[in-house]
Amino acid sequence: MHSADVERNPEMTMRSVIALLVLPLLAACQSQNPYQAQSLPMPPAPPGAANTFDRSAYPAPVRDYGRYRTWSWDGGRAPSGAAWLGGAQLADSVSAGLDQYGLRPAQSGNGDLLINARMTQETRLRQYQDDAGAYYGGGPWGRQYGAWGSTPIVRTYEEKVLVVRLEMIDAHDRQVVWSGSGEALANKDQRAQADAVRAAIGKALSGYPPH
């Protein structure tokens, strides 16, 4: 481009300069990008994954305890009891306790719930605090002086208790749906012992059905 043309058309000159500056940038953009996107294949699933159900991935279903109406002994065997209380008496006490919660013995076959019952006699260590004190002082009548002091003494003693443990199993899926235990002070008298067993069963069932 001649100088005379430049003087006549300065706008064309400016466009030419801009074009010369842009061309190298366009060439750089069209060059090959050294960074290439790549994807790795997914690792193969472990054998048997399609047939495995992961229970931990789902919340446990809510139990409808209202559908439990009948019960029977797990394995068809009533509890054995103990030397100081026969199995039949223990079974009757458990049955009476379940009856208060609307659970009736199954007339034939398995009930909705299978019951396990076990009774033991155990020793408990109890403690109580005895505040023993004494007065020290003297003086003529009406002008006494002195001080009172006390020292707490912790005393330990043993108690024999009856412990009843109950377990309820869903007869359909064999899952333990509830368990509880209760205890009562043991007694040498046979009649009082039976009362203690009934009290322990009542405490064991006090949390049924769970809320």
Image (cartoon, grey):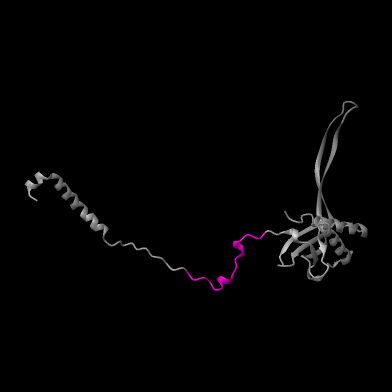
Q: How far across and down, in percent of the image, does residue 129 sit?
A: 81, 45
- The residue sitting at 23% across, 58% down in the picture is 27
Helix, strand or loop: magenta stretch: loop
Q: How far across and down, in percent of the image, does residue 170 sit?
A: 73, 65
Q: Is residue 138 left or right of residue 9?
A: right
Q: How far across and down, in percent of the image, does residue 124 sit?
A: 81, 56
In this rendered view, identify the residue nearer to me: 181 or 41: 41
Tell me which segment is drawn in magenta.
43-61
In this rendered view, identify the residue nearer to me: 141 or 108: 108
- The answer to whether residue 67 is magenta is no
The image quarter in which residue 181 lies: bottom right
- The residue sitting at 76% across, 61% down in the picture is 68
Q: Is residue 119 visible?
A: no
Q: Is residue 150 above or below residue 112?
A: above
Residue sticking out furthest to the top: 142
The image quarter in which residue 135 lies: top right
- The residue sitting at 84% across, 62% down in the picture is 95
Q: Is residue 67 above or below residue 43?
A: above
Q: Is residue 177 left or right of residue 17?
A: right
The image quarter in which residue 192 lies: bottom right
Count of marks overlaid on the render: 0
- The residue sitting at 8% across, 47% down in the picture is 5
Q: How far across and down, in percent of the image, does residue 109 sit?
A: 80, 70
Residue sticking out furthest to the bottom: 47
Q: Is residue 131 visible?
A: yes
